[in-house]
Amino acid sequence: MKKIEAIIRKSKFDEVRDALHQVEVNFFSYWDVTGVGNEKKGHVYRGVSYSTADIQRRYLSIIVSDEFTERTVEAILKSAYSGNVGDGKVFVIPVEEAYRIRTREKGTESLK
C-alpha cells in the first residue's frame, strides 16, 4: 500500500477529483493549506502588487493499493498541470498496514 500526498492549486481541485474518480479512486481526504513556495518575487494584477510569499493550496491524502499507485499519480499529474510555477507536488510514501475499525479488516481489504 502507498500513501499519496499531493499539494495542488485550489483552482485545479475539481479537475483532480474528477480524474481520480475516473481511475476508480473514490475515497480520499483533503484540506485547505497555506505554504511558502520557492518564488520570491511578487506579482502585479490589474496594477496592484501582491505577495506570493504565502500560497493557498489544497492538500490531498490518498491511500491506495500498490496496483493503483501509478494510475493515481498519473491522474493527479495530468489534471493538476497548468504549466506555470506553483502547480504543486506529489509524494508517494509506503504504508506498512491499514485497518478498518468497524470490521477489523486489515491490509488492502480495509481500503475497499
Image (cartoon, helix red, strand yellow):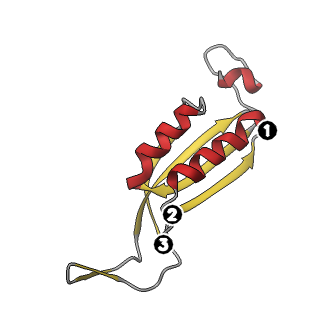
Crowd class of label 1 (few under 14; some 14 to 19; many from 20; radius 10 Å): few
Which residue is farthest bottom?
Answer: 41
Residue 87 tag number: 2
Mark sitting earlier along the chain (1/3): 3
SS assignment at label 2: loop
Q: Amino acid at mark 3?
A: Val
Please tell me which residue is depicted at 68% across the width and 40% down the height of the picture: 71
**N-term mark: 1 or 2:** 2
Q: Quadrant of residue 111?
A: top right
Label 2 vs 3, first from the N-terminus: 3
Quarter of the figure with the N terminus: top right
Q: Residues within 10 Å of mark 3 (few under 14, many from 20)?
A: few
Tell me where residue 75 appears, x and y as whole percent.
Answer: 59, 44
Q: Name the mark nearer the viewer: 1 or 2.
A: 2
The x, y position of residue 112, in whole percent, is: 65, 21
Choose mark 1 or mark 3, whichever is in front: 3
Give the vertical position of 66 relative to 41 (above or below). above
Label 1 sits on residue: 96
> Mark 1 and 3 residues: CB-CB less than 8 Å, in contact?
no
Distance Cα–Cα, label 2 vs label 3: 13 Å
Residue found 72% across the figure and 18% down from its top: 105
Residue type, numbered disc 1 = Glu
User: Gap between marks 1 and 3, in whole Å?
Assistant: 30 Å
Badge number at residue 36 = 3
- Label 2 environment density (alpha carbons within 10 Å; few <14, some 14–19, many ≥20): some
Foreground of the two, 110 or 86: 86
Indicate the secondary structure of the residue bearing disc 1: loop
Nearer to us: label 2 or label 3:
2
Real-space Cα distance between discs 1 and 2? 29 Å
Q: Residue furthest left?
A: 47
